Amino acid sequence: MINLGIIGCGSVMQGPYMDLVNKYIFKKLIKLKSISDINSNLEPILRKKFFFDKFYTNYKNILNDDEIDAVLILTSMNEHSMIAKQALLNNKHVLVEKPMATKIDDLKGLLKVARSSSKFLIPAPFVTLSPTYQAINSELKNKTIGKVSLARARYGWAGPNWGEWYYNTGGGPLFDLGVYNITSLTGLLGPVKNLFAKSSLSSKYRTINKRKIKANTNDNFQIMLEFKSGCIGVVTTGFTMQQYKSAAIELYGSTGTIQMLGDDWEPKGYEIWRNSRSSWELYSTPYANWPWTSGFSHLVDCLINNKKPLIKIDHAYHVNEIMIKIYESSKKNQEMSINSTFQTLQFPKKIKTKKSHLDHDRDHDGV
Ligand SMILES: NC(=O)c1ccc[n+]([C@@H]2O[C@H](COP(=O)([O-])OP(=O)(O)OC[C@H]3O[C@@H](n4cnc5c(N)ncnc54)[C@H](O)[C@@H]3O)[C@@H](O)[C@H]2O)c1
C-alpha cells in the first residue's frame, strides 16, 4: 500500500487526478493520507467529494510526515520546483505537473537534487507513455517514412477561465500547452540544438472566475526548433485557438508522412502515407481511454513492481530549458542555443496497433 499526499487541490486535482487516485484506492494499492491547499475554503468541499485523513494549508506538514511515500504536486506553476525539491530532500517520490520550473536556476537546482536522490521524480507531461505515441515512435525507428526533415506540432485553446496565475509570469500557454508538443517532438526526433520564437499578447484582459483581470504574460506563440538531427520543426501554441481539425503532430520523411490525430495529450490515432504504397493508412487508436494523467499509474506501477520510470529527467530538463529559452528568444528577438541533451527514449513494450476491432472495454491503464 502506497501512502499518498497531494499538494494543490484545484481543477486538475479534483477532476482527472482524483479519477485515477480513486481507482487505485478502490484496488487497495493506495491510501490518500493527506492533502494540502493554501485555500482553506476548499477543505469542506473536498471532504464531501473524497476520502482522506488530513487537510493542511501548509504543504510542509505532508513533507514532514514519514509515513507518506509519494506526493503529487498539482499547484500553480511557479511553486513546482521549490516544492518538488523539498519533497525529494524529505525522501518522497514525486510526481510534478508541468513545468518542473519556470526559471533556469530553479530548474538546475531541482535537477541537482533529483540526480542525487534515490527517489523517483516523474515530471509531466506524460505524452511519451501514450500507446499511440509509442507506436509512432517505433514507426520512425523502423524507418517507415525514411529520414524526417520537417515537423509540425500544435496545441491550443481559448484559455482557462479559472486560475488567474495562468495569465501572469510563470503561467501562459507555453508552459501549459506547448510543453506537450515540445515533449512529443523531442521524444520522437531527439534533442534540439537551437530555436527562434515569436510571442505576443492577443488580449490585454481576460475574464477569470467571472471577474475581469489584466493579462500579464504572452498568450500566443510561434516557435521554430532546429534539431541536432538536422530536422526543422515548428510548434504553434496559444490561448488564442478557438477550435481546430488539423493533425496534432506532422512528420515529413523522405519516403512518407506520419500524422498524429487529435491532440498529443489525447491521441485519436495516426495516419501514415508511404510512397511505396501510394496511399494513406489510418490506425485508429486501440487505447481509446488512455488518460493524460497516466504518469500517476506509471508511478504506482514503478513503486509496486519495482520498475524504473520510463519518464526521464534529462528529457524533461531539456524540454524545460527549451521553454525558458523560448521566452528569452522572443523577448530578445534572437536565436538561442540549447545546452542540455538527453538519451534516446526506450519503450520496452511492443504496441499492438492493428487490434482496434478487438478492443471492447477500452480500459488500458490498469496496474
Ligand atoms: N486544469 C487542467 O486542465 C490541467 C491539465 C493538465 C495539467 N495541469 C497542470 O496542473 C497544475 C494545476 O492546474 P489547475 O488548473 O488545477 O490550477 P488551479 O488554479 O485550479 O489549482 C491550483 C491549486 O494549487 C493551490 N496552491 C497554490 N500554491 C500552493 C501551495 N504553496 N500549497 C498548496 N496549494 C497551493 C491553489 O490554491 C489552487 O487551489 C498546473 O501545473 C497545470 O499546468 C492542468
Image (spheres, grey):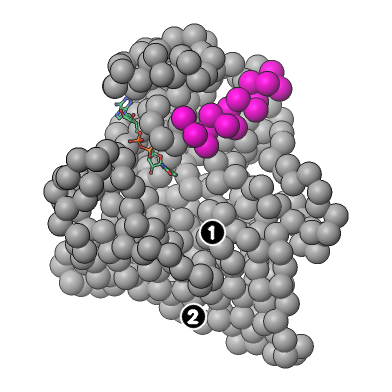
Secondary structure state at the residue bearing disc 2? strand
Q: Of 74 and 110, which appears nearest the observer?
A: 74
Q: Earlier in the sequence, mark 2 or mark 1?
A: 2
Q: Which label sits on residue 297?
A: none
Tell me which amino acid carries mark 2: Leu
Q: State which mark lies toward you, 2 or 1.
A: 1
Percent across and percent down for residue 133 are 62, 59
* Residue labelled with disc 1: 264
Q: Farthest residue in the right direction? A: 358
Q: How many numbered marks are there?
A: 2
Is 20 one of the magenta-colored residues? yes
Q: Is residue 282 visible?
A: yes
The residue sitting at 24% across, 40% down in the picture is 210
Circle 1 packing at 10 Å, graded few (<14), some (14-19), many (20+), is: many
Q: Of 262 and 109, which appears nearest the observer?
A: 262
Q: Rounded to the nearest whole Å, what is the CA distance between mark 2 and mark 1?
A: 18 Å
Tell me which amino acid carries mark 1: Asp
Percent across and percent down for residue 177 are 40, 55
Location of the C terminus by quadrant is top right
Ligand 1 occupies quarter? top left
* Residue labelled with disc 2: 150
Q: Farthest residue in the front direction? A: 210
Is 70 one of the magenta-colored residues? no
The residue sitting at 48% across, 53% down in the picture is 315
Secondary structure state at the residue bearing disc 1? loop
Q: Is residue 354 above or below residue 47?
A: below
Percent across and percent down for residue 233 are 43, 74
Q: Magenta span covers which residues?
A: 14-29
Q: Is residue 114 visible?
A: no
Q: Is residue 300 above or below residue 276?
A: above
Left or right of 6 on screen, residue 168: left
Left or right of 61 on screen, residue 18: right
